[in-house]
Amino acid sequence: MRNLRSIGIVAGLALSVSVPALNAFASERTVPPAPALFPAEGKISYVPRDSILEFKALPEYHEPDWVTQKYVKTGKLPPVKDRLPKEPLVFKTANMPDGIGVYGDTMRHVIGGRPEGWNYGAGQTQGWGGIDIGLSECLTRTAPLFQVEAKDTEPLPNLARSWDWSSDGHKLTMRLIEGAKWSDGAPFNADDVMFYWDDEVVDPNVSPLNGATQETFGIGTTLKKIDDYTVEWTFKEAFPKQYLYAMAYGTFCPGPAHILKPQHPKYSKNTYDQFKNAFPPEYMNMPVMGAWVPVEYRPDDIIVMRRNPYYWKVDEKGNQLPYLNELQYKLSTWADRDVQAVAGSGDFSNLEQPENFVASLKRAAEANAPARLAFGPRLIGYNLRLNFSANGWGNPDERGQAIRELNRNDDFRKGVTMALDRKALGDSLVKGPFTAIYPGGFSSGTSFYDRNSTVYYPFDLDGAKAELAKAGIKDTDGDGFVNFPAGTAGGKNVEIVMLVNNDYTTDKSLAEGVVAQMEKLGLRVVLNGLNGTQRDASQYSGRFDWLIRRNDQELTSVVQNTEQLAPVGPKTSWNHRAPESGEVDLMPFEKDLVDIVNKFVSSEDNDERASLMKNFQKISTEHVYNVGLTEYPGALIINKRFSNIPQGTPIFMFNWAEDSIVRERVFVAADKQAKYELFPEELPGKPGDKGPMD
Ligand code: GLA
Ligand code: CA
């Protein structure tokens, strides 16, 4: 047994078997087996944080020639130097993998989501897949930090060009980029920032898309305007530098106050619903600070975005970015995104659904393959989340309430996790070295992961049944499914409704696997499969017993969305929130988790932070806070004609690859440019106008 560990590499795939897992009695807790190596992992070359960008004026500025000819010379647009801020954001050439680019071409995305509208700050999705990332600019930016050594990591400046802490660490003064404009030419300033804060984040009737609340920035945190280009934060803790991450995508990306404010109930006769829906998908040319502006929408067909003539970032030669004139978003399915990217009819995919791995790898290995495919670290994972609110979040009925009580029972969760055959779950998605045993907690690919702090209860069906019995649920009527005790929910079979996102094959496969495995345990689970938008709505309002959730940044980066690790505020956790009125009813071990997160946020000592997170991992996996299902690496698929794609870009870490590759710097060399632009030589029109400028 012992030497199994040293069994070597077979056909390039390492088979690794953990000794403790084999020697221990199945039901004894242990650490998860060491994950197998997988082929083709791209290597990242690390760079210092300050080598990426700076803010400064350049002697001259340039734009695509057709913009000068068609728009500036005809007086439709001011000259480029007058459209740029005094000191634009300058990307340093040395950090650009292929250097200064040329203008032209488009990136053809394919997505499975559908747009609800353009009011991101009021909670509307644009269909994901990086559309909103291309429209939004945020106070800070974190996606490119995957290439910065963890010890050097602090968010990059963006709309906030610099910041200073007061000597006691309770105040943070941020200077905004000066003289930058929205894509319609209106000035960007502190009023936009304050509208987002006061009327979207702090206003309890509005929930921005990625769920920012005041607590996202710390309990009691306030923000005020000092002047047009300065805002000041006040925090209860001293030096909570962690919140600089919350000021990045997707929790601090202000929308255009000059367009939004007149529709907000505080300044109009609108209801909150009318405000939210004031900018439906058909509304074109919504002003943005991002590099591209939506100019065309055809339902279930396509969204087209054209270059923002007021974009405030340049390269070192003074070329206004982006290099790509257009972004296309074909409205299809997520699985089709992989298929089209490898086939060359699409340009980009985050290969994240293992069901497509084998076919994609095969196609990408062919000599004439149109796209590159490169795996990153094992950062895509799935958890089963249990609704822990026993005091009314989502208004459960008697059955639902009884499930919440079970979810809060340690023996019950242990039974559930021990009944999961994770090897079988992983293999049902894809055979081979990709998927790994994942008990829950942090992804094994993050720098904060520590295997020895990870508690794993191995697969053991008999042991699992004994745990359910300890939790007081037995099959009293002999139909194979455990019942509630007499006196609870009528002593009926325990029936759990599990929320799942129907837009993804992987989510559905995992959900079906869980249902089948729970059936062997004697636990009846029924699926509530909804499309992404409806699913999110059910989750945010607490209408679920269990849910399948793809891991978010708090588990893949730890520093991004840290507040989502535990219920540090009434609405920060995915599966444990406060009811309309009331507080989060924390379990004792959750209080420990909340304390750890709060300490982590206010600590500046890297060693202390690492040890806090080891402890977090230990407590959360020991108590089965999330029930891990599987984890595996994702691969970036990108058409070979694109330049400036950093090597080894993970598809997900601080943010999705659509942001990590820094699309505004991506270009297509002149001899590789294709004629894919749908609106060549067109620029966005006025807000609300149909289509581009004429
Ligand atoms: C969806 C996709 C991801 C990524 C994000 C970007 O969630 O599944 O791969 O494209 O959108 O927001
Ligand atoms: Ca029964």
Image (spheres, rainbow, N blue to C red):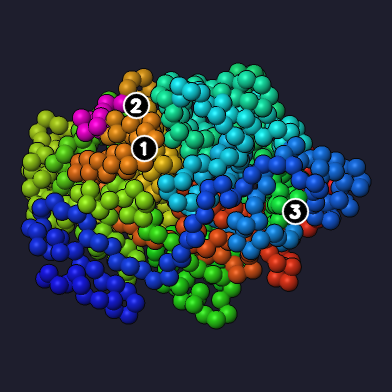
Residue shown at the point (37%, 33%) measured from the top left: 603
Query: Circle 3 sits in a helix, a strand or a loop, which is it?
Result: loop
Q: Which residue is mark 1?
A: 605
Q: Quadrant of residue 86?
A: top right
- Whether residue 391 appears in magenta in the rendering, the answer is no
Side (left or right) of 616 relative to 413: right
The outermost residue toward the front is 167
Q: Mark 2: few, some, or many residues within 10 Å (few <14, many ≥20)? A: many
Q: Position of residue 21 (x, y in %)?
A: 15, 60
Query: Circle 2 sits in a helix, a strand or a loop, which is it?
Result: loop
Q: Mark 1: few, some, or many residues within 10 Å (few <14, many ≥20)? A: few
Q: Quadrant of the N terminus?
A: bottom left
Is the distance from the Cβ of mark 1 to the nearest ligand 1 atom less than 8 Å? no
Query: Which amino acid, by three-letter code, is at mark 2?
Result: Ala
Side (left or right) of 36 relative to 602: left
Q: Nearer the viewer, residue 593 or 92?
A: 92
Q: Does the rendering let one see residue 114? A: no
| Label number found at residue 317 | 3
Cα–Cα gap, marks 2 and 1: 32 Å
Q: Which sits earlier in the primary sequence, circle 2 or circle 1?
A: 2
Q: Position of residue 225 (x, y in %)?
A: 61, 21
| Label number found at residue 578 | 2
The outermost residue toward the right is 74
Depicted 39 relative to depicted 446: above or below? below
Q: Mark 3: few, some, or many residues within 10 Å (few <14, many ≥20)? A: some
Q: Nearer the viewer, mark 2 or mark 1?
A: 1
Q: Does the rendering let one see residue 663? A: yes
